[in-house]
Image: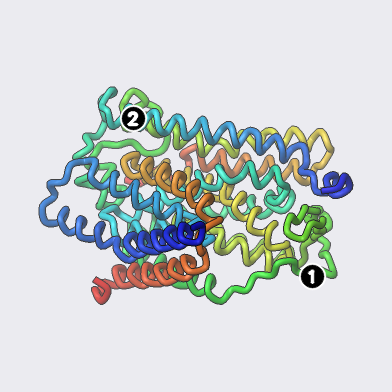
Amino acid sequence: MNTQANLASRPSKEQVIYANILVIGVWIGLGILFLTYAIYVSGILPSHVDMMLVTQNWDKGVNEYLAITHSPHGLGWLALMGKGDFLNYLGFAFLALLTIVCYLVLVKGYFAKKDWIYAGIAILEILVLSLAASGLLGGGGH
Amino acid sequence: MLNNLKNSINRFLVTVTVLVLTCPAGAFAAEQAVVIGGDKPWWYWPVILFFFCFILGILAVMAGVGGGVLYVPLVSGFFPFHIDFVRGVGLMVALAGALAAGPGLLRRNLANLRLALPVALIASAFSIIGAMLGLYLSALNPDIIQVCLGATIVGIACLLIFSKNSEKPVVTNQDAISMALGLGGVYWDEGGRENVEWKTHRTLLGMFMFILIGLVAGMFGLGAGWANVPVLNLMMGAPLKVSVATSKFLLSITDTSAAWIYMNRGCVIPLIGVPSIVGLMLGSLLGVRLLAIAKPKMIRVFVIVVLLFAGLKAMDKGLGLGILG
């Protein structure tokens, strides 16, 4: 690739930072998933819901399942971090929070470049993702 | 010698494809056993699911489709899990795959942030509405979701058969929205050894389509690469490579919002979720390596046939016809 081509097709600084955060975050997230799952299935920490009860009821709708297993919805899992099964949510949540972290970096970059349209889009996206993560929408069900 | 090895690998892949995809028969038979006996140990289904997803990951890469679009119809059709949990985990599977693929695509400037951000905002907002609507309908009657999912999967299979992507679409007039947002760029085409400049048109129409894509992705827990690519490429005029890469990256944003809705509702069960995510990701890694020596076209045709079958089976199940077992 010649120098001109290299310059023209080079990714923006924000894009590279975004990629760097993702690559580290994904491996950390997968590591957490693997570790917490090992803790769960090995029984190092007690489970909130017995595994046999899970397998006997995973063919039921989510509302019925939650009622039978006395499992929380919304962000209720945070209060059960000491239980092997709900500890796994740490990995899921970490992966699902990565994009928000990446967007925070984008906002800073776009503000620095005075790219107000994209700064606004990035802020709106953070709001949308935060609203989804907050448990305020669709967290209920009983 | 090398040809023999390639042929052996191809034969192996096709055999495994047939075994796993036509024959979630193993899974199906075991499902019957659970119904009859219900005496399986807790690890039985997670182990089967892990290997199933591992193979699915290999095939998804070779067929050029996302993991989620295969995962949801096949697992909901052949495993004993309720569709609520399959959709929740399906989104996590698609999300994990997109997050893993993102860095490479961004660094090579194939996935374009300026193109992704506006459409991602629309799709992610509407995927929340789709997820809530899907969970509401499922609570009313899961058969509604099964039938709609089946119809969507059949539609996706048809899209994969008939859609003719354009490598480098010609865009003569960049529209006002595209210019205001700066939707264009340059990428280095390794094959042609040249810089490819591109820009988009029909941006407003494309954005409207992302409303529908977000709704469908959220409602059925499907990654939406199958829809993103035609809209970005055929409608908005982005080059195919940029469309595919940006689509994959887009999933990491669109699926995040819907995944949170399902997770907060309790639809992600670790016993189903972790083996699925890890299995599919490991399978995808192997799939990328095998891609160089296998015959993806044959596998793609087979996967499309299986998608058609899975879609029809979901419709059959939802309508209670019992024609497909």
Relative side of B267 to A102, left or right: left
The residue sitting at 19% across, 46% down in the picture is A56
Amino acid type, mark 2: Ala
Near-viewer residue (B175 or B102): B102
Q: Is residue B43 above or below residue B66?
A: above
Q: Which mark is residue B141?
A: none
The residue sitting at 42% across, 67% down in the picture is B307
Q: Judge whether residue B88 can be spotted in this image.
A: no
Query: What colour-coding does the image apply?
Result: rainbow
Amino acid type, mark 1: Val
Determine which quarter of the picture holds residue A122.
top right
The residue sitting at 59% across, 55% down in the picture is B123
Q: Which mark is residue B170?
A: 1
**Chain of the residue on which disc 2 is drawn:** A
Give the Cα separation between the discs numbered 1 and 2.
52 Å
Relative side of B312 to A12, left or right: left
Near-viewer residue (A13 or A9): A9
Near-viewer residue (B62 or B259): B62
Pointer 1 with pointer 2, Cβ within 8 A: no
Q: Is residue B169 above or below residue A101?
A: below
Residue B44 lies, in percent from the top left, at 23, 45
Residue marked by disc 2: A38
